[in-house]
Image (cartoon, rainbow, N blue to C red):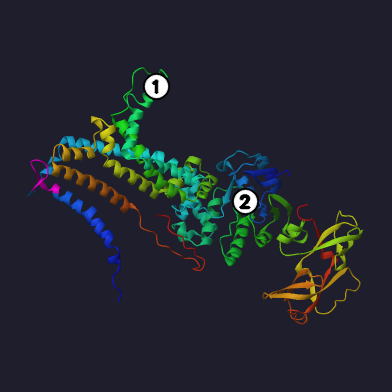
Amino acid sequence: MKGADVDIVGVSKFFGSFQALKNVSLSISKGEFFSLLGPSGCGKTTVLRLIGGFEDPDSGTIAIEGQDVIGLPPDKRHCNTVFQSYALFPHLSVFENVAFPLRIRKIPQQLVREKVMRYLSLVQLEMHAAKKPSQLSGGQRQRVAIARALINEPSILLLDEPLSALDAKLRQHMLMELDAIHDKVGITFIYVTHDQQEALSVSDRIAVMNMGEVLQIGTPRQIYENPATEFVARFIGETNVFSLKIVSIDGTRIYGEVDGLGPMFVDDETDAKPGETVLATIRPEKIRISADLPNTNGGRINVLHGIVAEPIYSGFQTKYIVQLDTGMMVTVYRQHANWSEGIPDIEWKDEVYLSFSASDMVIVEMHGQ
Amino acid sequence: MRKQVGLYYSLPQIVWLLVFFAAPLGIIIAYSFLKKGLYGGVEPQFSLEAYAAMANPNILIVTWRTLKISVIATILTLLIALPCGYSIARSRNQAMRLFLVIVPFWTNFLVRIYAWIAILGNEGFLNDILRALHLRNESIQFLYNQTSVILVLVYMYLPYAILPLFSTIDKFDFTLLDAARDLGASRFQSYVRILLPNIKSGLVTAGLFTFVPIFGAYAVPLLIGGKDSYMLGNIIADQLTKTRNWPLASAISMTVTILTTGLVFLIAMRKPREQKQVFDADPGLAIPVPSGRR
């Protein structure tokens, strides 16, 4: 892509005989908040280290702002990193940690003082300038690391699971703060995480990775609503997957059969032909659960019958795990949204009907295909 | 009320220290203030003669030389031990490399000194090679000078410097070097500005572990050195066995002891006190982290 800030084309990386990255291509545009999402060991941190200059790829090219950077050491690249462990220098004060890049460049003291205080105030740590990193809390250290990485005014900020060491509440807070900082400085953020909620809530685009491969790149909505593969569908949120043997296709109107469950309608695009088997998915929140047989009005609504195997109440919603007549388990979320829904409580061992629209179903690639 | 049982438990150590450390030290202190006996030993009579005798220019020259040799040897040892310790700490095969560092300890100290004589001597291995290659026809005098003494001292005390440096560097978080590079530091700058300040305690320990024994060296200058590399340890031995001036030998020993303990004490005092942990954020979020120094 022309005008891209970071352009990675066909990059592979081996560690010994282990292939950490398989032909990865990414194009990240200027100012984007781009997330690399995947389980641990999927290669996302390796991508970050390649961009940062800590490793070089075995094949493929990496360009930053149009310039080929392979072989260029980290100190010559216009990007800075926020490390997972923060990597604050324990022997230096907060002030000197943030000032470090300026000291290296031999900036005069007056300018250093002024600029460091400006960046410390960006992360609201002016009060703690004289402290040592060991005297700060986890969230404060995190912010020092961010200020330090930003002070050289890089065009790209690389963040390696920066929130993983924080507890859940603080993580939410820091995430919002990161987003605000991104808006303020306006540079490209490349954010590595294994937490799909984090990635969904702040990213402009997400690349989902697994086993060294990029499976899908898209906006959070695209990735969630239209997962490309079974892995993406299962990794981002929860989903229910049916093996669907296609009987007929009319445009995007697919009619098929699921073993033991009978006919099923799906509205989605597919390259598959009648007679072939595909994976059809439905998100738990898109399934309606009811005690009575719902009226489908002849629409393209699928109805399944089962018994509640496990209701899990969590305040704002209840998660039901329903065992279908075939033994298959289906997950359903029911929001406790308003006062007038009027549905009687559904409890353990209750017989229930599950209904969902064909248009909410998505056909995904089989894993490993 | 609880009895103070700690005292009983530590009795063996106390006895051991009294018999093998405090008592000999007391004897040396006492001897240094007594009058010298005619045929060695001491006369039970108070005297400051021994300390006055130390003003002897010969002894002052040797003291200065001992200090110089010790400082040079210690610096060289640290310069070699630092990259060694670093590479062992970053190696995947630490156990094997540490083993190789420790192996020489299994050979007797004197045997290892004689091995150096076999290498550096006029008819030694090194001269043999030079002759065989026809680079030189006559032997080069490698032994019996300050350079050879420093070389062998460095060799002898290198493991004492490598081990503490290794254990400090091993605990160092190498991500910090990545961070320094990331923030614009060259490789060299990242070592000087980030690695060195964080392994200071290891450097100090390694320095003391080499400086203190080298300052009291005896066998190496005796066997490898010549007249120009006589050290305080040799003078003490001479006073004890040849000149038979036990008070003077004791006085010099005392001086060496005071100088080295003084040095250790100074360095220990210079270390800033442990930093108190301050949590001014939400106390539930504070992560206690041990202060960097060990």
Q: Chain of mark 2?
A: A
Structural crowding at the residue carrying mark 2, measured as other residues with C-alpha within 10 Å and reported as few (<14), some (14–19) or many (≥20): many
Query: In the image, which residues are magenta?
Result: B31-43
Which residue is at a point 68% across and 43% down the rendered structure image? A12
Residue B181 drawn in magenta:
no
| Whether labels 1 and 2 share one chain | no
Residue B230 lies in quadrant: top left
**Viewer-nearest of discs 1 and 2:** 1
Residue A368 point in image, percent of width and height: 76, 53
Secondary structure category for the residue under label 2: helix
Q: Residues within 10 Å of mark 1 (few under 14, many from 20)?
A: some
In the figure, is residue B234 to the left or right of A172? left
Label 2, on which residue?
A45
Q: Is B82 situated left or right of A142 in this image? A: left
The quadrant the N terminus of chain A occupies is top right
Q: Does B96 sit left or right of B36 as displayed?
A: right
Task: Specify whether residue A106 is in view.
Answer: no
Residue that appears at 45% across and 46% down: B195
- Disc 1 target residue: B130
The chain letter under disc 1 is: B
Q: Nearer the viewer, residue B112 or A236?
A: B112
Coordinates of residue A44 in the picture (x, y in percent): 65, 51
Is A33 above or below relative to B288? Answer: above
Which residue sits at x=77%, y=79%?
A: A350
The answer to if B34 sits in the magenta stretch is yes
Image quadrant where residue A323 sits:
bottom right
Residue A196, quarter of the rendered image: bottom right
